[in-house]
Amino acid sequence: MASAAAWGLAGLLVLAAGFCLLERQLWRACLGFVAFALLMSLAWLLLGSPWLAMAEALLGALLTGGTLLWTLRGRGALPRLAPVDETPRRARRTAPLRWLLILSWLSLSGAALIWLLGLDALRPPTSINRLLAATGVLIMGLGLWGFSAQRHLLRRLLAFNLLGSGVFLVLAGLATSAPIPIAEVRALILIGLVVALLGSVLGAALLLQLHAQAGQVTLNAVYGADANAGSGTGAGLTPGTESSAAPDTGAGLGASTGR
């Protein structure tokens, strides 16, 4: 039977993940991820894997969290990122497609759990492993939503790491309930932590270069209604600025004076 501490930890994990994705103050969102990674360390301790808990604290909280916080400061020719994410979310007209993809992913995950565990997967969790596996599914859903709805690349990096953590929890929860070798699963999770760290470092470096060269923190330029009003030309943004007044148009960075 899952203890009250396990239920409390599961709730804190979901709350920390939601805070990371919803907080528009980027410094606080990154600190929220560090707290989430430390909570993940406690989850590994509850699952009886102290060395995996130490790896999570080092690779997740210290190195990955430190990389995300370092990205906000800028260095030398790399300008400092704005502390608040003022970019709009994606256009509402694409929301049904995004939700369809998210539900499809979660449905496939649920089908895999039922195939491995049988109808017991549909019952309320009664053990720590099942509880954390169910928590992992929720975090996966939050990560998918954040990655599809947010446009700021740093917030997408946060969603990417949260999605991976959800997958790790599902794998760890299944390791003792399904015919899967526990040692191999934990080794796979460790490799996943290393890959997530390397992906975060690469993503942060590309974000800083994009911001330095094009003044963007998204993959596409955001055009404001004020820039197009009265001119009718649809001119792009001046390098180093972004407008949050209009939804994503999918267009590249337009021409501006002096370029």
Image (spheres, rainbow, N blue to C red):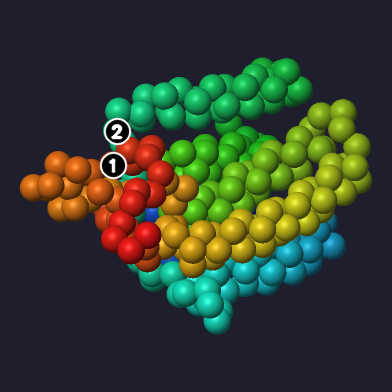
Q: Which residue is found at the position 61% from the left and 52% from the top?
A: 161
Q: Residue furthest front?
A: 258
Q: Residue furthest bottom?
A: 76
Q: Position of residue 74 (x, y in %)?
A: 52, 76
Q: Is residue 71 above or below residue 223?
A: below
Q: Is residue 185 above or below residue 5?
A: above
Which quarter of the rendering shows the N terminus? top right
User: Given contact means CB atoms under 8 Å apart, are the residues at marks 2 and 1 in contact?
Assistant: yes
Labelled disc at residue 170? none
The reply to whether residue 80 is in sight is: yes
The reply to whether residue 5 is in sight is: no
Which quarter of the rendering shows the C terminus? bottom left
Q: Position of residue 133 (x, y in %)?
A: 66, 39
Q: Could you classify mark 1 by the number of other residues whose Cα lies within 10 Å: few (under 14), some (14-19), or many (20 or more)?
A: some
Judging depth in this view, the residue of 244 and 19 nearest the camera is 244
Q: Which residue is found at the position 61% from the left and 63% from the top?
A: 205
Horizontal arrangement in the rendering, residue 119 relative to residue 79 (left or right):
right
Q: Is residue 53 above or below residue 102?
A: below
Amino acid type, mark 2: Arg
User: Which residue has dot 2 on it?
Assistant: 92
Horizontal arrangement in the rendering, residue 129 relative to residue 239 (left or right):
right
Residue 105: quarter of image? top right
User: Which of label 2 and label 1 is nearer to you?
Assistant: 1
Amino acid type, mark 1: Pro
* Earlier residue among tags 2 and 1: 2
User: Which residue has dot 1 on it?
Assistant: 247
Q: Position of residue 4 (x, y in %)?
A: 58, 53
